[in-house]
């Protein structure tokens, strides 16, 4: 069996008492927690064990003790689950990027679907009607952010802030893996022994790969120019920013993210784009079907980013108002709408501030796609304001979705449709879309 590493947690934990530290314990895994770890009970306490699966009996060693639960490191599997598979990545047990590669893919989907079903039934919906959106479970990410420190370029490790060197990642689109292999040495030389920072790769519609470097400290503009010359096409150095001083900005044209058919979003590294292009298209299609935009009908797109949903809704005939706090994205979205001749007005607003929220005149349909924190304030606003009758809620966190659905349900909205979208295969993240009407 491959070596298993300790569990990743960022909460401070107590030192392990001597009697616990040296004693392996046998645990029976009952279920999977929301973060993908196995859950067992021992000494009347819940224990979380990374890489353990329901139905398994494992040998584990306590690694961190908390007041209400413990964490343990998997030492060996005594009885393996029939759902256990060999990870698709050689560094899975060290890398912090994925949590579910040891679980077969259909079971990953079932686990995520069950999480969403709980939220749906908890708010009066029918779980049996939840649809499933999915595409390839490999090579699906069009962007990745790696860290650099002391000669290592890779992802953060599972159980620490150390960096695991990544040569290739099976979840990344091929152009990113190629760009990584071709340019790793030049990037590592650029950082040298002392500097540290982050390197973002973003593959666009045309196979170009933009590289953005965020460095601690000052940016050496001459060396950045040299790095730009050294990077092998079709990858190119987009920009280098530092925590101090001026940035190096290349003269490259923006990247292009393809949404539906011929619709594209112009973006730069740092802008939000949905990581999984194929699943994103399915989500847009579904939201279009649910919201059924009519000619000249007014629709609001809250947390619109670059206009991923706004463009598709306007292209289908609606007039759209998009709201987001990202200034540069709103600028870029506004220009795109002008260039495409589409009737979209974008507004830069903080949607966590109730005083800043507005509903456009004549608007009865809304789409919202908040970050993990959800959209509590906005949902309270929509609940209180009786003009909105249909909401497509795109969520990347079932916990905040549950909280927000409860607010909307209490105001008379009911769940008409729902879908689980596997935007992030092999990780514990659950993306979902819920359609509410009243
Ligand atoms: C999950 S992304 C969705 C973006 C877009 N709908 C898309 O599909 O590409 C969440 C968006 O919420 C925006 N956001 C985060 N906090 C915000 C806030 N307090 N007010 C308004 N927008 C916010 C981010 O800028 C980001 O564009």
Image: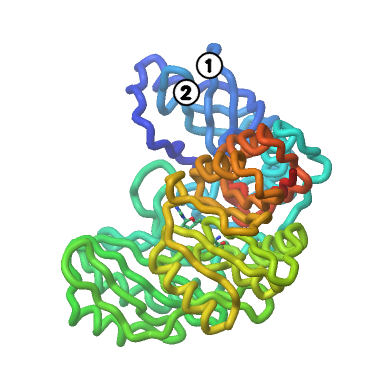
Q: Which residue is mark 2?
A: 70
Q: Work out whether residue 196 or residue 358 is closer to the camera in this orientation and state it.
A: 358
Q: Work out whether residue 57 or residue 402 is closer to the camera in this orientation and state it.
A: 402
Question: Looking at the image, do the residues carrying marks 1 and 2 touch, with CB atoms under 8 Å apart?
Answer: yes
- Decide if residue 139 is on the left or right side of residue 157: right
Q: Is residue 436 above or below residue 331?
A: above
What residue is at 65 percent from the left and 81 percent from the top? Answer: 262
Q: Is residue 26 above or below residue 132?
A: above
Q: Is residue 11 above or below residue 139?
A: above
Q: Quadrant of the C terminus?
A: top right
For label 2, being within 8 Å of ligand 1 is answered: no
Q: Quadrant of the N terminus?
A: top right
- Decide if residue 371 is on the left or right side of residue 398: left
What residue is at 55 percent from the left and 43 percent from the top? Answer: 381
Q: Secondary structure at mark 2?
A: strand
Q: Position of residue 408 (x, y in %)?
A: 64, 38
Q: Secondary structure at mark 1?
A: strand
Q: Closer to the N terminus: mark 1 or mark 2?
A: 1
Residue 45: which disc?
A: 1
What residue is at 82 percent from the left and 45 percent from the top? Answer: 129
Q: Work out whether residue 244 or residue 315 is closer to the camera in this orientation and state it.
A: 315
Q: Is residue 104 visible?
A: no
What residue is at 46 percent from the left and 37 percent from the top? Answer: 7
Quote the CA–CA distance across marks 1 and 2: 7 Å
Q: Work out whether residue 177 or residue 131 is closer to the camera in this orientation and state it.
A: 131
Quarter occupied by residue 170: bottom right
- Decide if residue 295 is on the left or right side of residue 23: right
């Amino acid at each position: 069996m491959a070596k298993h590493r300790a569990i990743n947690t960022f909460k401070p934990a107590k030192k392990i008492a001597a009697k616990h530290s040296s004693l392996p314990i046998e645990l029976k895994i009952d279920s999977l927690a929301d973060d993908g770890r196995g859950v067992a009970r021992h000494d009347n306490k819940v224990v979380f064990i990374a890489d353990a699966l329901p139905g398994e009996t494992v040998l584990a060693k306590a690694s961190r003790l908390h007041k209400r639960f413990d964490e343990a490191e998997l030492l060996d599997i005594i009885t393996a689950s029939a759902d256990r598979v060999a990870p698709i990545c050689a560094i899975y047990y060290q890398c912090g990027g994925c949590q579910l590669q040891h679980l077969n893919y259909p079971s990953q989907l079932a686990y995520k679907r069950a999480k969403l079903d709980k939220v749906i039934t908890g708010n009066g919906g029918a779980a049996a009607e939840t649809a499933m959106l999915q595409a390839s479970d490999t090579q699906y990410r069009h962007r990745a952010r790696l860290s650099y420190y002391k000669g290592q370029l890779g992802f953060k490790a599972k159980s620490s802030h150390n960096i695991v060197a990544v040569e290739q990642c099976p979840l990344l689109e091929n152009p990113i893996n190629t760009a990584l292999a071709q340019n790793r040495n030049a990037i590592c030389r650029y950082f040298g022994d002392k500097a540290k920072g982050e390197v973002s790769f973003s593959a666009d519609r045309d196979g170009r790969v933009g590289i953005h470097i965020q460095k601690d400290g000052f940016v050496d503009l001459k060396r950045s120019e040299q790095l730009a010359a050294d990077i092998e096409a079709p990858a190119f150095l987009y920009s280098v920013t530092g925590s101090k001083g001026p940035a190096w900005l290349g003269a490259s044209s923006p990247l292009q993210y393809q949404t539906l058919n011929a619709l594209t979003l112009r973006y730069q590294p740092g802008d939000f784009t949905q990581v999984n292009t194929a699943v994103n298209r399915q989500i847009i299609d579904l939201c279009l079907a649910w919201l059924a935009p009519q000619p000249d009908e007014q629709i609001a797109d809250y947390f619109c980013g670059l206009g991923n949903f706004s463009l598709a809704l306007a292209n289908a005939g609606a007039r759209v108002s998009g709201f987001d706090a990202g200034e540069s994205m709103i600028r870029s979205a506004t220009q795109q709408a002008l260039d495409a001749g589409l009737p979209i007005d974008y507004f830069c607003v903080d949607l966590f501030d109730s005083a800043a929220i507005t509903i456009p005149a004549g608007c009865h349909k809304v789409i919202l796609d908040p970050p993990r924190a959800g959209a509590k304030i906005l949902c309270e606003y929509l609940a209180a304001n009786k003009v909105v009758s249909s909401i497509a809620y795109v969520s990347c966190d079932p916990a905040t979705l549950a909280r927000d659905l409860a607010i909307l349900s209490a105001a008379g909205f009911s769940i008409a449709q729902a879908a689980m979208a596997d935007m992030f295969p092999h990780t514990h993240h659950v993306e979902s879309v819920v359609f509410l009407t009243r």
